[in-house]
Amino acid sequence: MRTTRTAGALLAGVLTAALAGCGDAASAEPPEVTVTAGPQEVTARPTQYCGEGQGQRYSVTPPVVEVSPDTPIALTVPEEVAQHGWGVQVYDERLEQRIGEVDVERGTTTFEGINSSDVVPTAFYLVVVEDRHGECLLTGSWPIGFLRAGGDLGTEPTPTSAPAGPAG
């Protein structure tokens, strides 16, 4: 039993040290992503982010945007996220199964290459995921729900059910 506790404490210490390696000082508020769907504009807060401070996970409820079929969707990230690179992951209505992924060219702050009818389910999530960079174990992850006419997001995802970002 003592070995298990020691290994667990060691692992926790290593993870804390690795997360602390994201920067020297705790950062202020993490950046938000802006979503424009037709005439609507909403902001999304990250479920996790590592800027100039320590890697952090956040308890947030992703925004849900009601959209008509064929509504253009634009995702805008802050300049710092664009410089690191980012992509869009498409998830089912419960944020459990990834059903697609779109790479965005590094340096791009606004991606306009998707509309509400590009995704087969009528309820889905788009998750903006920052590319891994530096020493950070956690990269930025911003989930946004979309509900097309006739769709149902079912039960709301728990803050911890949001994807943790890219693997590897």
Image (cartoon, rainbow, N blue to C red):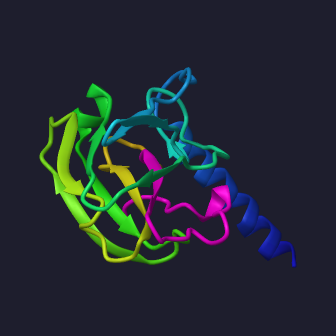
Relative to 83, say whether 9 is above or below.
below
Taking the image as drawn, is residue 137 in sight? no
| In the displayed structure image, the side of residue 43 where residue 70 appears, left or right | left
Helix, strand or loop for the magenta stretch, by majority: loop
Q: Report whether residue 65 is seen.
A: yes
Counting from the top left corner in percent of width and height, residue 134 is at 33, 41
Residue at point 63%, 43% (across, down): 58
Q: Depth check: 41 or 127 in front?
A: 41
Residue placed at 29% from the left, 72% from the top? Answer: 100
Residue located 30% across and 56% down the image: 88
Assess whether residue 13 is covered by the magenta stretch: no
User: Is 88 or 71 nearer to us in this picture?
Assistant: 71
Q: Position of residue 14 (x, y in %)?
A: 60, 53
Looking at the image, residue 149 lies above or below residue 78: below
Residue located 49% across and 71% down the image: 151
Screen quadrant of the N terminus: bottom right
Q: How many marks?
A: 0
**108 displayed left or right of 13:** left
Q: Nearer the viewer, residue 138 or 80?
A: 80
Q: Which residues are magenta?
A: 139-168
Figure quadrant of the C terminus = bottom left
User: Is residue 164 found inside the magenta-colored segment of the image?
Assistant: yes
The percent position of residue 112, horizontal first and vertical second, equals 18, 45
Q: Estimate the x, y position of residue 34 in percent, counting from the top left.
A: 38, 34
Q: Relative to 140, is 117 above or below?
A: below
